Amino acid sequence: TAATIEYIKPFTDQNPGTSGLRKRTKVFQQKYYSESFIQATLSNVVDSSDVSLLVGGDGRYWSEEICQTIIKLSAGNKVKTVYVAKDSILSTPAASNLIRTLKLSGGFLLTASHNPGGPDYDFGIKYNCGNGGPAPEKLTNAIYQKTLEQNSYTTVSALPIIDLKTLASYTFEIQNALGESWSTTVHVIDAIKDYVTLMKEIFDFPTIQNFLKKSNAKILLDSMNGVTGPYATQILVHELKLNNSSVMNNVPKADFGGIHPDPNLTYAASLAEKTWSENIDLGAASDGDGDRNMIVAKDNVFVNPSDSVAVIADNAHLIPFFKKSGVKGLARSMPTSMALDRVAKRKNLQFYEVPTGWKFFGNLMDAGKLSICGEESFGTGSDHIREKDGIWAILAWLNILAASNAEKTFEQGFIGVKEILENHYRIYGRNYFTRYDYEEVSSEGGAELMKYLRNLVSAENKTHVVGKKYTGNGETYVVKKCDDFSYTDPVDGSVSQKQGVYFVFEDESRIVYRASGTGSQGATIRVYVEKYEATNYLTEASTALSGLVSIAKELGKIKEFTGRDEPTVIT
Ligand code: VG1
Ligand code: CO
């Protein structure tokens, strides 16, 4: 079969954001658009005759078409082996694991994560490297540069359409006009089972199963019609022997059944309501591509993700994986609350604060410096892979629940999510946290807002801000420090600047402003608000934070720049 060159015009808008290139599906459907990005990636990663890649995604609309395109371009670019997930169903964490266990060069993940899918919504392509983690900025910048100048791509258009429904292998002999020849092998693989095996190695499945049986605990996992359905069903129903009612929305759908597959109290409200009204002991949801998680429980309990990672870190000794390897260090993204910092301090563990986006954790993990980390944006994970992992987080909670009740007879009930959380607050105090999102505001307004804040905390102006008093709802806070967050990677020394403007007050409260890097339309401004209370831990978060929230609105001139009185989403 012949490899051929197709001539195209460069594209100017293919700069990957926080987590891959995400646009409206229609943008990806433009002629040559996807080919351009795929070729630019291949040009940067095919560096030998032994390159092997993984392809799959969250199953959203247009994935199977792009799987075929990637296979053809990979063959054209002399990739030796392409592993494609059956039905293209491959969660982001499972992809990270497969890249690592099969020792692949990397992989293409077809996902826009928690963004809605379908012909009128979003699609995305993300590249992960051989360590299983998202491409670092150095590579994404190089890919972007390539798309700006690239005027052709190489493909094998005559390749047959690969049947993604059937596990099988195919080898193609390819030649090009220069007389070179090579072969490319395509394997359609089961992308579920290795991940299930991994989870069974990490967690104490016998103890969890025993707990579930004896306690009669009610568990409910909402896959939001995203990719975790088959994984959740295999793990909860087939391995842990729960009945079918413990999983919902567990068949992946190309348009997520119209759901916005983002596990938070706005978009996964039905799961939360069901959990609270039906007294479910552990309710959980995961996002489109399976790397995010939300944990809720009966008695109106919502576990804030910043607290979730802190509780998991505090209880890591109950999880076999960490019992074996120990906890090497803890880390969070900058806007995530400082609850985790307190665990690190008390347990005398190395601690890191990185910019938003999972790619920054990978270097620390590869260097053996980090075991458990999280983001406020419903992302929790560990060094078992190089992505955040929704199912892992849910199993971590189940493992902690089970191990905390190992000695119980269950006649008097058991220690639940609520008790575990309140016990944590009793020991550590509570970092109240909320995030206000102003989605799809005008790009200009968003840019102006960030420019205004950057200027406010610039070297020249910051002296006027530090020491200044702000009052909201009758509470007064004094600015202790402020800046635009900059991060120097302790492993490779690379510097990432302009990662978010923060204000820290004298009582350690914080307000952070960032422009989102994952949206596909206009700009999204995120405002993060945090306040620590040593003993008063039972207040509603919205009440505890109302003063700071009104200061955050004023300080950032939110109304003036965005035209909005209220945010679109509060988490
Ligand atoms: C958001 C979150 C960030 C997360 C990223 C990818 O980025 O804030 O914490 O890592 O999404 O998550 P941004 O730039 O929009 O704030 V996912 O589940 O979309 O891979
Ligand atoms: Co995701």
Image: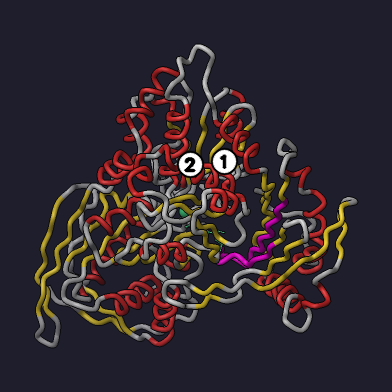
Judged left or right of residue 253, residue 431 is right
Q: CA distance from mark 2 to mark 1?
A: 8 Å
Q: Secondary structure at mark 2?
A: loop
Question: Could you say where residue 384 lies in the image, as x and y percent from the top left?
Answer: 35, 52
Does 539 appear above or below 354?
above
Judged left or right of residue 45, residue 504 is right
Front in this rendered view, residue 227 or 340: 340
Which residue is at a point 49% across and 77% down the rendered structure image?
Answer: 13
Which secondary structure type mostly characterizes the magenta part of the structure? strand
Q: Are marks 2 and 1 in contact (CB under 8 Å)?
A: yes
Judged left or right of residue 186, residue 301 is right
Does 375 appear above or below 357?
above
Front in this rendered view, residue 290 or 334: 334
> Image quadrant of residue 537?
top right
Q: Residue flagged by tag 2: what amino acid is it?
A: Met
Which residue is at a point 52% across and 53% down the rendered structure image?
Answer: 348
User: Mark 2 or mark 1: which comes first in sequence?
Assistant: 2
Question: Could you say where residue 382 lies in the image, as x and y percent from the top left?
Answer: 42, 52
Mark 1 Cα shell of 10 Å, populated few (<14), some (14-19), many (≥20): many
Mark 2 Cα shell of 10 Å, populated few (<14), some (14-19), many (≥20): many
Does 464 appear above or below 93?
below
Residue 327 on the magenta segment: no
Question: Could you say where residue 274 lies in the image, as x and y percent from the top left?
Answer: 57, 28
Whether residue 289 is visible, yes or no, is no
For disc 1, the marked residue is 268
Which residue is at a point 38% across and 29% down the rendered structure image?
Answer: 208
Boundaries of the magenta span: 512-531
For disc 2, the marked residue is 224
Q: Secondary structure at mark 1?
A: loop
Q: Is mark 2 within 8 Å of ligand 2?
A: no
Q: Residue flagged by tag 1: what amino acid is it?
A: Ala
